[in-house]
Amino acid sequence: MTFFIAEIGINHGGSLDKAFRLIDSAVKTGCNAIKFQTYNAEDRVGKSSPLYEILKSCELTFGEFEKLKNHSDAQGVEFFSTAFDIESINFLNEINVNYHKIASFDIVNMPLIDAAAASGATTFMSTGMADNEEVSRAIEIFVKRDARVSVFHCVSSYPLKKSDASLGQIMALKELLKGIKIGYSDHTKGIEVPLYAVAVGAEIIEKHFMLSGDKDCIDAPVSIDEKAFKMMVKEAEAVVDMIGDKTIKGVEAEKGTRAFRRNVNAN
């Protein structure tokens, strides 16, 4: 079955109450996990960045993240977060997350990747902007530490046009990284592209999540609400059923037709 991550990210806008409501809404979709972003804006982008004020306004404290982790646990949904610095990874380890996320922007940040690999948790790593060599170099860290990792195809464009989704990279990653689960982190509008990603082999889907009707949502152009996310989960299950077990053989639906085969042996 497909593993679904509701990427809350910074869609809480810095409000702990809104973050709680986002978790409560996401739980109703059938997602397996919810994800936030843990960072210090000064370290993440610096005060001179045009993104600084937005990111600063969306910061949550470590104490607030611990409350969100406890709330998620009580709701029966997995909590984890994208850490943008080693201090954040260490904190997330302290509250016993089972997953870490390395964003595409940090796939060449070897100290951060090594900290995630050393944690004992499974790491999800996005590959936006990376080539084969960069992906392989990052994977080597997990191999050396005998650490668990899943790799997400991702295109770092916001919002992403469907025609630029480059879903063939999912199959390329499966070939390059045999034995490693491949997922897809989506930045398109709607749910169509994630469903196609499942069809070509993505086992994990990460999609930005927002409250229905939230006019102030930071990542609204790439986010979907509870109703759409629930539909995505349902439709993805149907896609998996249609794919079947990938073995060349007769299927149960053909049982009544088998008697009409023409078994003619050529001499």
Image (cartoon, helix red, strand yellow):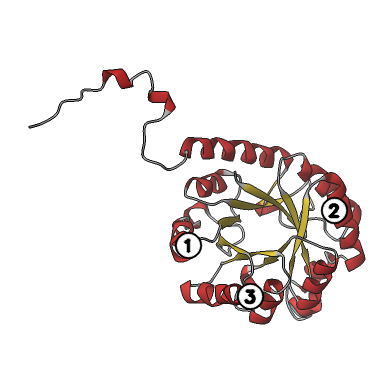
Image point 84% across, 66% down: which residue?
A: 57
- Classify residue 124 as left or right of residue 134: right
Residue drawn at x 75%, y 53% is 34
Circle 2 Cα neighbour tier, 10 Å, few/some/many (<14 / 14–19 / ≥20): many
Tell me what residue is drawn at x 64 percent, y 74 percent.
106
Residue 45 lies, in percent from the top left, at 73, 77
Q: Position of residue 22 (x, y in %)?
A: 81, 48
Residue 156 in view here:
yes
Q: Which residue is mark 2?
A: 19
Q: Earlier in the sequence, mark 1 or mark 3?
A: 3
Please determine whether, in this image, residue 66 is positioned above or below residue 47.
above
Which element carries disc 2, helix, strand or loop?
helix
Q: Residue at x 52, y 38 (%)?
A: 239
Are dots 3 and 2 in contact, CB under 8 Å? no
Name the amino acid type tagged 3: Arg
Give the CA separation, mark 1 to mark 3: 18 Å
Estimate the spatial distance between the alpha carbons at disc 2 and disc 1, rounded to whole Å: 37 Å
Task: Confirm or deny contact between disc 2 and disc 1 (CB under 8 A).
Answer: no
User: Disc 3 marks which residue?
Assistant: 145
* Above or below, comparing residue 63 to residue 144 in the picture: above
The Cα–Cα distance between marks 3 and 2, rounded to whole angstroms, is 34 Å
Does 244 appear above or below 100? above
Q: Where residue 242 appears, x then y in whole percent?
A: 48, 35
Residue closer to the observer: 227 or 216:
227
Q: Amino acid at mark 2?
A: Ala
* Left or right: 119 as drawn, with respect to 125: right
Q: Nearer the viewer, mark 1 or mark 3?
A: 3
Residue 178, disc:
1
Secondary structure type for disc 3: loop
